[in-house]
């Protein structure tokens, strides 16, 4: 036992010296499967995995030896190292020798073939995303950056879409069960469902490479967007979903329609109709003038009578055109007013709040019970609360 208190530097330095002094740990060969391989400058970093253990590896000047990929089974020669500054154990690799494809990746490819044969990835089974969704459910971890990115991206172009979050674990043991359960519970309740998480290692994305999640996505009647990982990541959930987004932010762009752009398109269409009608009126006036000149050459009095009649018809036509435009503008104005009235944010801005439980709106106090957790949506944020008291007025 030490007879004095050690500083962190002294303790880590002592441990480091043990590694340096142990000759059996110098130049050892380790067998395992590569995971999370990434290159940074001249060096590469990854994890070597066994059945029940793993250790991070450093491959300095990676181009001087075989460059592995995720899923490769390899023999690594090198030495374990204990980094004093951070107290981190790693394995410094000197050479890499390929052995073959790792068992996990073999099993993944076998699962892909099985599900593809059963039609789980079939294009004819996929459902098109709605053009103008009102309610979007995001199945992800409510504490991660993913939901913030999705919320911010949608709100940049659309203030009226209701964004619901179903909180699940997106990595670790049992996460696939939570994700599959969330898909079953939210199916049919929303216009579109986004299953999302940020990037990560092969192990981090494992729940989205499971048969359980793939079949849950396939069984959904609601269109499902898979937004798992970064642009280069590709999972089984991406293949099973109705649409795949390279990132969670891309998924938000995929489901959100631009309100201002929609209004501009509507007004542009009405303007085009007005211009077309005006052109028809001008054509009528030109044809009328030509007819008047022709008739004037044949008969003065008849021309005067016909001219008066034609002018009257022109007036009727112009009046009808103005009435048509006014009616269309009035209809549009009513629709915009109705659209604004339906906007939940308009109601919230007046001081009202919306209550939901487990992602489902609550419209009656009798739907709640003491101790239940609820989500309260105000105009400027979301409140998590617990029912402490219930009083029914009717």
Image (spheres, rainbow, N blue to C red):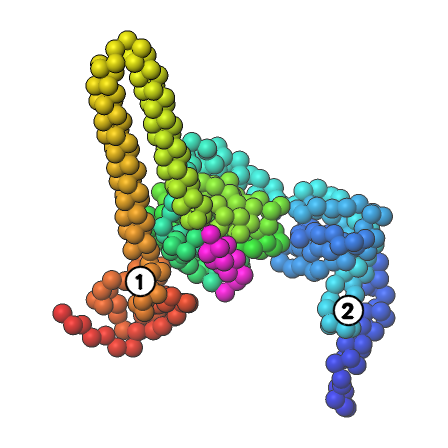
Query: Of helix, strand and loop, which one carries label 2?
Result: strand
- Residue 76 location, x and y as percent? 78, 52
Other residues around mark 2 within 10 Å, as few (<14) / some (14–19) / many (≥20): many
Range covered by the magenta-colored residues: 143-157
Mark 2 or mark 1: whose residue is earlier in sequence: 2
- 380 or 122: nearer the eye? 380
Q: Please tell me the numbered disc located at residue 82.
A: 2
Query: Majority secondary structure of the magenta segment?
Result: helix
Q: Is residue 219 visible?
A: no
Q: Which residue is mark 1?
A: 347
Residue found farthest to the front = 300
43, above or below 377, in the image: above
254, above or below 147, in the image: above
Residue at 25% x, 30% y: name it.
315
Query: Of helix, strand and loop, which one carries label 1?
Result: helix
Q: Image quarter for residue 27? A: bottom right
199, above or below 119, in the image: below
- Asked if residue 213 lies left or right of residue 44, the reply is left
Residue found farthest to the top = 298
């Amino acid at each position: 036992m030490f007879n004095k208190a050690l500083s962190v530097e002294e303790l880590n330095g002592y441990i480091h010296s043990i590694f340096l002094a142990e000759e059996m740990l110098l130049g050892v060969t380790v067998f395992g499967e590569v995971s999370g391989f990434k290159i940074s400058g001249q060096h590469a970093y990854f994890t070597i995995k066994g059945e029940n253990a793993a250790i991070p590896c450093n491959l300095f000047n990676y181009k001087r030896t075989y460059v592995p990929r995720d899923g490769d089974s390899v023999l690594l020669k090198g030495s374990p190292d204990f980094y004093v500054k951070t107290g981190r154990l790693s394995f410094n690799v000197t050479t890499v020798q390929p052995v073959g494809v790792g068992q996990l990746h073999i099993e993944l490819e076998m699962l892909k073939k099985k599900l593809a044969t059963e039609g789980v990835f079939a294009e004819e089974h996929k459902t098109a995303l709605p053009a103008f969704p009102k309610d979007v459910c995001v199945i992800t971890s409510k504490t991660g950056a993913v939901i913030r990115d999705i919320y911010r991206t949608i709100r940049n172009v659309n203030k009226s879409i209701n964004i619901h979050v179903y909180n699940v674990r997106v990595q670790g043991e049992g996460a696939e069960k939570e994700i599959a359960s969330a898909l079953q519970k939210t199916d049919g309740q929303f216009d579109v469902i986004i299953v999302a998480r940020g990037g990560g290692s092969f192990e981090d994305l494992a729940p989205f490479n499971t048969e359980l999640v793939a079949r849950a996505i396939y069984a959904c009647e609601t269109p499902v967007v898979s937004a798992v990982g970064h642009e280069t990541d590709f999972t089984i959930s991406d293949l099973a979903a109705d649409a795949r987004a390279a990132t969670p932010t891309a998924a938000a762009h995929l489901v959100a329609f631009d309100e201002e752009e929609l209004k501009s398109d509507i007004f542009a269409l009405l303007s085009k109709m007005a211009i077309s009608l005006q052109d028809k009126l001008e054509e009528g006036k030109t044809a009328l003038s030509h007819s008047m000149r022709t008739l004037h050459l044949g008969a003065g009095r008849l021309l005067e009578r016909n001219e008066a009649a034609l002018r009257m018809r022109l007036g009727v036509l112009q009046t009808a055109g103005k009435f048509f435009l006014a009616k269309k503008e009035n209809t549009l104005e009513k629709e915009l007013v109705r659209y604004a009235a339906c906007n939940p944010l308009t109601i919230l801005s007046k001081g009202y709040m919306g209550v939901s439980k487990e992602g489902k709106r609550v419209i009656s106090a009798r739907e709640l019970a003491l101790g239940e957790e609820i989500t309260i949506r105000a105009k400027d944020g979301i409140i998590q609360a617990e029912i402490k008291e219930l009083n029914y007025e009717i």
